Amino acid sequence: MNFNKSFWKVSTFLVVVFFLLRPELMTFALFIDGIGLELFFLLLEVQFVAVIAVYVKPTLQRIYRYVSKIDPFFFIPTKPILVRFPAMLCHAVPGFMLVYLFVFANKFGSGAEYS
């Protein structure tokens, strides 16, 4: 018997029995028994991600605006642009193009040493 399947069956049974022993949670136990523990955890995960996104998204937007001000070459390309031009991915790494241009300017400079 597959351990993963038996684990979910046993854990669902234990959770349902635990909730059935408490009269105020009996409806909840029937709900979990109906949809399954795995789907219930998936629903909890979706709710958790939605709540966390409320706090994380504004922070990420502030970081994006800050990096955009510092690095004029920074932008996040869309998927069709990346499919057509994969080298555009280097623009999505903050500071990469500035470092690349600095190294390029130092390596090839004025060209006087190659005459």
Image (cartoon, helix red, strand yellow):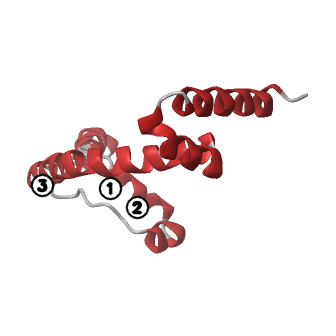
Pick whichever, 13 or 94, lies toward us.
13
Disc 3 target residue: 65
Residue 37 position (above or below residue 72): above
Place of residue 13 in the rendered image (x, y in percent of width and height, measured from the top left): 68, 31
Residue 14 in which image quadrant: top right
Disc 2 target residue: 88
Place of residue 33 in the rendered image (x, y in percent of width and height, measured from the top left): 63, 44
Find numbered disc 3 in the image and state the secondary structure of the residue it sits on.
helix
Mark in front: 3 vs 1: 3
Horizontal relation, residue 87 to residue 51: left or right: right
Disc 1 target residue: 91
At x 52%, y 32%, the residue is: 19
Query: Which numbered disc, 2 or 3, marks the residue that appears first in the sequence?
Result: 3
Amino acid on which disc 1 is placed = His
Find numbered disc 2 in the image and state the secondary structure of the residue it sits on.
helix
Pick whichever, 57 or 88, lies toward us.
57
Q: How busy is the neighbourhood of tag 1: few (under 14 within 10 Å), some, or many (20 plus)?
A: some
Find numbered disc 1 in the image and state the secondary structure of the residue it sits on.
helix
